């Protein structure tokens, strides 16, 4: 993980104000599954979730290489999220086409959504077409549930992942 | 449930219990026992017997849990043909071999016998073991891993194992191994989108004699037809393929089936209950939560050698969750019984009944 910096000087963009304050940003538990389980609040009603809400969940994820959020680096955007019937497609744009951190970024997006959303959502994650030299390999790995499950049992990787998932400016941010 | 199909899937038993995702189910070939494994690192055992009300219905009960001691997910389980030994393959890269103390040979040994004990731990893989399987004679065990290798072990007396070969044919993770139902032919499926077939050269080592290409993404699961003249595969490309043996060492893709909207994680080919001239029932399941059952028939006078008819289907088999494993009961008295394991940590048992 350490050593080579894949993009030493990324362009940083201002982040927009959130239309709504996500519970995550409001400083509640990092493990927000319970608060976000609509089943718990209303037995039968299925709470609709839109693209902006998904974006609010992932915009604050820290880039593994830079002291910036994925939103500030334009790695993620609301326009790159597609909602279907219990299906979410999140596209992200690595800052450089040889970015070796892409699978880690994709994995952190997947974990954030996994921890935040009701189980009924099937999530697909892919890099923006043409934005990465190993596009197919990155996409395949991010959407292989067995590989994802095994990665999440790798303590070194999980430690790195948790740093990306901490709020920017939190105690361990660089 | 699709009402226009000739059969439907009736839920016989819902067996929750795993704390995390259940990855695989495996029926004991000789005893009324069903095992499941999970990311919670345990194996759960269920026994079954005819229930008190109704001759056809079965009652399942939890009869024990093996904590296993694996330090990571137990991804795969396989019974030896004797039904006395269980193998576990774990993300901790090891394969465990389990036998029960004081096993009596009586039919209801399932309910009475002692604890399951780890007889041997097979170390060799460098990374996650993803699948394990015994050959039909029970003398060979195969395992595969993300380390791209397939290992073949000889099963010796007293839980002793000797490595007969390490096959490094695949260029990516090996997802599944499956032995031919009567011959010593091994098939493996991989993240590299191919299937490889292996045999033992008596004067040399095990070697790959054929590569089956055609799938356009990861091949997740394999199942031989009960007679062994066909091999079925399921893939992330959302297709199921059936490969026919056209020569002793040559297999050709003869049929491609569709019927799932997400990765097809598991496939199982059983004898089924239809007409005797058909090739049995094929069942598939996956990330879309559906279970499909197809009747496979050999065609005599048409261009395509096989035909497949969807005879039963259920959606949301494990509610909103992915279904990771499906398996026909191998016992002759229950050719219409199958079990599934899902991301909800539960195991379900289904019977295919006329609509």
Image (cartoon, helix red, strand yellow):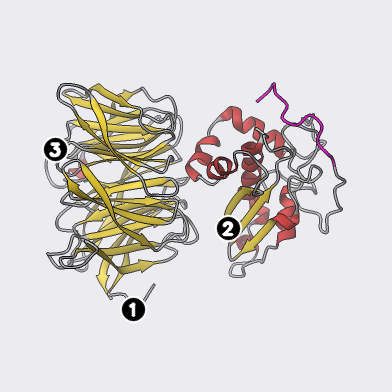
In the drawing, does residue A29 fall left or right of residue A37? right
Residue under the point 29% across and 34% down: B87
Q: Chain of mark 1?
A: B
- Report which residue position mark 1 lands on: B4
Residue under the point 16% across and 23% down: B157
Q: Nearer the viewer, residue B278 or A172?
A: B278
Q: Which residues are magenta?
A: A1-12
Magenta stretch secondary structure, dominant: loop
- Report which residue position mark 2 lands on: A121
Picture layout, residue B267 above or below residue A161: below
Q: Is disc 2 in the same subunit as disc 1?
A: no
Q: Is residue B327 visible?
A: no
Picture layout, residue B245 above or below residue B171: below
* Image quarter in which the C terminus of chain B is found: bottom left
In the drawing, does residue B318 fall left or right of residue B227? right
Q: Verify whether residue B183 appears in magenta.
A: no
Residue A169 position in % (x across, y down)? 83, 36
In the drawing, does residue B76 fall left or right of residue A90? left
Neighbor class of circle 2 (other Cα within 10 Å; few <14, some 14-19, many 20+) is some
């Amino acid at each position: 993980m350490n050593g080579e910096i894949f993009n030493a000087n990324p362009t940083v963009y201002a982040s927009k104000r959130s239309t709504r304050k996500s519970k995550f940003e409001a400083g509640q538990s990092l493990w927000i599954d319970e608060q976000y389980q609509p089943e718990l609040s209303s037995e039968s009603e299925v709470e609709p979730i839109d693209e902006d809400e998904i974006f609010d969940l992932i915009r604050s994820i820290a880039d593994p290489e830079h002291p910036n959020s994925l939103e500030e680096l334009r790695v993620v955007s609301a326009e790159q999220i597609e909602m279907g019937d219990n299906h979410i497609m999140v596209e992200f744009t690595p800052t450089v086409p040889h970015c070796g951190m892409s699978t880690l970024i994709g994995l952190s997006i997947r974990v954030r959504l996994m921890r935040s959303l009701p189980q009924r959502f099937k999530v697909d994650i892919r890099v923006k077409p043409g934005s990465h030299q190993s596009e197919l390999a990155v996409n395949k790995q991010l959407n292989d549930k067995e590989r994802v499950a095994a990665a999440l049992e790798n303590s070194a990787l999980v430690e790195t992942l948790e740093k990306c998932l901490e709020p920017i400016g939190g105690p361990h941010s660089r | 449930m699709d009402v226009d199909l000739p059969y439907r899937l009736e839920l016989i038993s819902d067996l929750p219990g795993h704390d995390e995702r259940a990855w695989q189910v495996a029926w004991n070939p000789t005893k009324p026992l069903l095992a499941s494994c999970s990311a919670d690192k345990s194996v759960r055992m269920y026994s079954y017997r005819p229930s008190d009300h109704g001759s056809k219905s079965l009652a399942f009960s939890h009869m024990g849990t093996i904590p296993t001691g694996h330090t990571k997910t137990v991804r795969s389980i396989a019974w030896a043909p004797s039904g006395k030994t269980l193998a576990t393959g774990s993300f901790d890269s090891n394969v465990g071999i389990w036998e029960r103390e004081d096993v009596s040979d009586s039919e209801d040994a399932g309910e009475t016998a002692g604890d399951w004990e780890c007889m041997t731990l097979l170390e060799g893989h460098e990374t996650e073991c993803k699948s394990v399987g015994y050959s039909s004679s029970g003398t060979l065990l195969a395992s595969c891993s993300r380390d791209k290798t397939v290992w073949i072990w000889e099963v010796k007396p007293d839980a002793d194992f000797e490595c007969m070969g390490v096959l490094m044919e695949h260029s990516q993770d090996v997802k599944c191994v499956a032995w031919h139902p009567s011959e010593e032919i091994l098939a493996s499926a991989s993240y590299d989108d191919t299937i490889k077939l292996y045999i033992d050269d008596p004067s040399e080592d095990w070697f790959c004699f054929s590569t089956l290409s055609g799938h356009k993404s990861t091949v997740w699961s394999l199942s031989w037809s009960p007679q062994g003249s066909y091999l079925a595969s399921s893939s992330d490309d959302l297709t199921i393929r059936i490969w026919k043996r056209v020569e002793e060492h040559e297999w050709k893709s003869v049929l491609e089936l569709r019927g799932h909207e997400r990765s097809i994680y598991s496939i199982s080919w059983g004898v089924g209950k239809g007409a005797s001239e058909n090739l049995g029932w094929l069942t598939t399941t996956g990330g879309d939560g559906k279970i499909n059952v197809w009747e496979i028939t050999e065609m005599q006078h048409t261009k395509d050698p096989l035909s497949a008819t969807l005879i039963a289907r259920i959606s949301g088999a494990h509610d909103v969750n992915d279904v990771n494993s499906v398996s026909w009961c191998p016992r002759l008295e229950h050719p219409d019984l199958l079990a599934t394991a899902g991301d909800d940590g539960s195991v379900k048992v289904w019977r295919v009944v006329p609509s």
